[in-house]
Every structure is written in structure tokens, then in C-alpha cells.
Image (cartoon, rainbow, N blue to C red):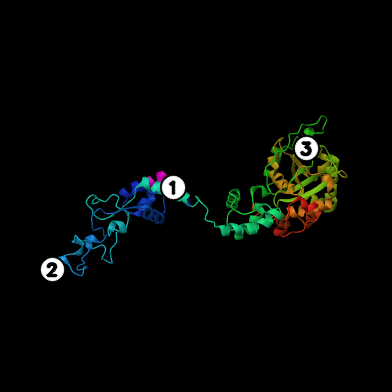
């Protein structure tokens, strides 16, 4: 049996029967599959004490030779021969300093450490230690859940948590995940435990409504007539083709691409890129959701990075079936010399989870631009500021590092300049609409 695994009822019954049949702990260990030391500790911990029913309950009674424990011994007066105190009807338990209810028996001192299987148990007048699988199982189940029945935190702990969390949650609008990344040692409790405290309203001045993340469902969208589609270009660019390409080229860096809309009625929107290895995100403001606007962004990236860096870091792009990505040829090829620079693949219809990392990152972006946000109110400079904060937010998936810090190890410095990235200290990260006002 592997370590760190809970005992089941059948395991306890197996131990109970093995105690009666096995000659030593090693034999029982081989039979049950448990470590010898762990097995011995388990038996000693869960053996049940049954006190003797006779008047002299001392565990040393059978081997005791003490006399004259009382100042005036009754038997000494009537008989010159001294009688052992253990046989005295008046009882010696209260006056003897060596009194113990624990039985002085070889079977208790070594394996099996209990009275189970002893031939003399019927006649033995000492207290007994037994291993009853039914009672042991009840005790194991009770102890297993005991630590989770109520919190050990005090009112002082809740006040301390309120002082630490209140400015970060209420003022800087930071998520609990982000706070835990940098302040887990100060907090002293797990992420789930803090959520329970907030749910039970134990932390003063912080409630569930103050937490940043909420579940929101988008409105259903009916496709317009005569919209441009990528149907004629799907051959060789489906998600199955993407999986095959990645398996053949396992070292290829994958970039996920998507758009963030303010509404379905047109107007400005965002074109976003996410590098899977680092979770680093780029975003560019589009005047409208069209293939021409997307093409302009690709041309800007090519000019800034150069063709070699563009081919290296944007070599494999995964996106959805949006109309703005309907013509991949204009994005994949260099229109001057006809060279294919990159490969674009499409997710299956209705399967946005196939590019789940960028969808998850949009949740962080939406903290600054909540739906329905009008992107006509901002410019690229304000968008770059928002991205600096999003890319500086620590993530559990990155071992509590921020995407910007990890990106420095995987990406060229020129890519970080596309949105003018600079590192922001985690405690100064501010994910709120007030950031761009």
C-alpha cells in the first residue's frame, strides 16, 4: 500500500484478523502491505482499554511482592508472617506509588501489543487491551473529520486578515488568487479556507460581493447573413490538424489569438495574443472587427520585430472562427515575395475551451474593461497601461510568478516592447476600471 493513503474498513479488518494469526509484526506487514513501524503505531494508538472488574486493578498485581504499605498492617498484628499487599482485601491501589492500571504483560510489551488471540484471556484478571476492528473504524472516521469540523482561528486572526486583505480587495481590486501568491505566509491559511471565512462572514468588512471574479453568461448571438467565413480555408487548418502539427513539432511555441468586443454592434475592439509558455498577453486596439484591421496589426508586428523574429515567435497561431480571421492567407504569407511565414489553425465551432488560456486571461482584462465597455473611450496608450498591470499579476500556474517575469526567459525583448511592458510590484497591481479613467 502506498504512503499517505487513508485506511479503509477492509484494511482494518485485515489487521484485526492478522493479529490473531501472525507471529510477528514483519509477517503481518507482508500480509497487509503496511510498513512495520506504521503498523505498530496504528495498533498502539487504536487499541481499546478495558479495565479489570476485580478490586485490585493494578497491572503489576501478579508479580508484586510489596508488604507493609500501610502504617498499621492488620495482618501483621494477627500473624507474624507478613502478607503481600496485593492480596489485602483493604486494597493497596491508593497507597502504592507504583500503581498502574496498564497490565504488566509480555504480550502487551511486544507484538501483538494487545490481548487478541491470548489463550489465557478468559482467566486473566488484569485489565485488557484489545483491537476491535468495528470500534477502531468508528474512531478512525471520527478523527479523520475532527480537524475539519470547526475553525481554529480566533477573532484576533479575523481582524488581522481584515487589515491585510481589505486594502488589496476593496481599494486595489485584486483577486484573492493574486493576493495569495505574494502574501500566503502572512495570511497563514489556504485559498479555500479564506473563501470559507468570507462566505461565513467571519472576516470583518469583506463579503462575497467584494470579490472580483463573478460568473457571467454572454448573450446568445445570431449570425448575420452574408458574413465572410473561413470555410474555404479550413482544409489543413482544423483543430485536429493543429494537434497533428504540434505532435510532429513538439518544440513549437503556440500563440493563441482572439478578439475582445465591447458589443456586437460594431465600433472599436481589441485583438489579443497570448504566448502559452509564459501566459504573456499582447493587445491592440482595432477600429472595427474586420480582416483589414487584423492585417494592419500583423504588419505592425512584422515591422517592429522583423521577419525572422516574427516567424520564430508567431510560427503557430490558434484562433477561433470569427469573421475577422476569415482570410488566413493574408496573415500567413508575405505578400511581397509569397513566402509562408506562419501557420494559422482554427478551433472547432463552439469549442472556445480549445484556446482556454487566452479565454482565462480575458477574465483578468475584463476586470479593467467590464462588459459592456466602450473601447471608443480609450487609446492604445491606456490599453498598454492596463496590460502592464495584467501581465504583472502573479499566477499560481506560473509558480506564483507574473507572466511578464516568465516572458523574459522565453521571449525576445522586442516582443515586450510591443505594448511597452514594464514590471509592476504585485501589491501595486490595480485591476479596476478606475485604472484607465
Q: Nearer the viewer, residue 111 or 225?
A: 225
Task: Using the rendered view, name the quadrant where residue 266 is placed.
Answer: top right
Q: Mark 3: few, some, or many residues within 10 Å (few <14, many ≥20)?
A: some
Q: Which residue is mark 1?
A: 141
Residue 305: x and y in percent read 82, 53
Nearer to the camera, 190 or 280: 190
In screen coordinates, is 213 left or right of 337? left
Choose mark 3 or mark 1, whichever is in front.
1
Residue at 59%, 57% (x, y): give it. 158
* Local crowd size for mark 2, using a 10 Å CA cut-off: few (<14), some (14–19), many (≥20): few
Q: Is residue 239 above or below residue 388?
A: above
User: Can residue 221 be seen from the camera position used here?
Assistant: yes
Dot 2 or dot 3: first in sequence order is 2
Tell me if 387 is positioned left or right of 248 in this view. right
Residue at which label 2 appears = 77
User: Which of 151 and 397 lies nearest the eye of the viewer?
Assistant: 151
- First reached walking from the N terminus: tag 2 or tag 1: 2
Task: Identify the residue under disc 3.
Answer: 322
Camera-side mark, 2 or 1: 2
Q: Residue 149: x and y, percent? A: 49, 50
Distance from the alpha carbon under mark 3 to that under mark 1 = 54 Å
Which residues are drawn in magenta? 8-13
Do residues under tags 3 and 1 come within 8 Å of each other at their CB atoms? no
Observer-side mark, 2 or 3, equals 2
Residue 265 location in percent, x, y?
Answer: 82, 37
Q: Secondary structure at mark 3?
A: loop
For residue 290: magenta? no
Separation of residues labelled 2 and 3 (CA atoms): 110 Å
User: Earlier along the polypeptide chain: callout 3 or callout 1?
Assistant: 1
Residue at the (25%, 55%) spot, across then down: 126
User: Which residue is outermost to the top?
Assistant: 225
Amino acid at each position: 500500500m502506498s504512503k499517505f493513503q487513508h485506511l479503509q474498513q477492509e484494511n482494518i479488518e485485515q489487521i484485526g484478523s492478522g493479529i490473531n494469526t501472525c507471529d510477528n509484526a514483519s509477517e503481518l506487514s507482508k500480509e497487509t502491505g503496511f510498513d512495520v513501524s506504521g503498523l505498530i503505531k496504528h495498533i498502539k494508538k487504536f487499541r481499546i482499554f478495558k479495565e479489570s472488574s476485580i478490586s485490585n486493578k493494578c497491572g503489576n498485581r501478579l508479580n508484586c511482592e510489596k508488604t507493609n504499605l500501610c502504617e498499621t498492617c492488620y495482618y501483621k498484628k494477627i500473624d507474624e508472617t507478613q502478607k503481600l499487599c496485593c492480596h489485602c482485601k483493604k486494597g493497596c491501589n491508593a497507597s502504592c506509588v507504583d500503581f498502574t492500571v496498564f497490565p504488566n504483560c509480555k504480550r502487551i510489551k511486544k507484538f501483538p501489543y494487545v490481548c487478541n488471540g491470548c489463550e489465557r484471556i478468559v482467566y486473566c484478571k488484569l485489565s485488557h487491551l484489545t483491537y476491535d476492528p468495528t470500534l477502531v473504524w468508528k474512531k478512525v472516521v471520527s478523527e479523520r473529520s475532527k480537524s475539519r469540523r470547526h475553525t481554529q482561528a480566533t477573532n484576533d486572526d479575523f481582524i488581522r486578515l481584515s487589515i491585510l486583505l481589505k486594502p488589496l480587495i476593496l481599494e486595489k481590486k485584486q483577486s484573492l488568487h493574486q493576493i495569495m501568491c505574494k502574501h500566503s505566509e502572512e495570511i497563514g491559511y489556504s485559498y479555500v479556507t479564506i473563501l470559507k471565512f468570507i462566505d461565513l462572514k467571519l472576516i470583518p468588512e469583506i463579503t462575497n460581493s467584494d470579490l472580483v471574479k463573478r460568473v457571467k453568461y454572454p448573450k446568445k448571438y445570431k449570425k448575420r447573413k452574408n458574413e465572410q467565413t473561413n470555410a474555404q480555408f479550413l482544409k489543413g487548418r482544423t483543430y485536429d490538424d493543429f494537434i497533428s502539427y504540434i505532435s510532429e513539432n513538439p518544440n513549437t511555441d503556440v500563440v493563441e489569438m482572439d478578439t475582445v468586443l465591447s458589443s456586437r454592434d460594431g465600433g472599436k475592439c481589441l485583438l489579443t495574443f497570448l504566448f502559452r509558455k509564459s501566459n504573456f498577453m499582447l493587445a491592440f486596439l482595432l477600429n472595427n472587427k474586420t480582416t483589414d484591421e487584423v492585417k494592419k496589426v500583423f504588419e505592425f508586428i512584422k515591422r517592429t520585430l522583423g521577419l525572422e523574429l516574427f516567424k520564430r515567435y508567431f510560427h503557430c497561431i490558434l484562433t477561433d472562427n470569427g469573421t475577422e480571421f476569415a482570410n488566413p492567407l493574408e496573415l500567413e504569407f508575405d505578400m511581397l515575395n509569397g513566402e509562408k511565414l506562419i501557420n494559422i489553425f482554427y478551433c472547432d465551432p463552439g469549442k472556445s475551451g480549445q484556446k482556454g488560456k487566452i479565454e482565462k486571461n480575458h477574465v483578468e482584462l475584463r476586470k479593467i474593461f467590464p462588459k459592456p465597455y466602450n473601447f471608443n473611450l480609450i487609446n492604445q496608450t491606456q490599453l498598454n497601461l492596463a496590460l502592464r498591470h495584467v501581465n504583472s499579476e502573479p499566477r499560481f500556474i506560473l509558480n506564483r510568478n507574473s507572466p511578464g517575469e516568465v516572458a523574459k526567459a522565453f521571449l525576445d525583448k522586442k516582443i515586450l516592447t510591443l505594448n511597452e511592458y514594464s514590471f509592476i510590484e504585485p501589491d501595486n497591481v490595480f485591476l479596476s476600471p478606475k485604472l484607465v479613467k
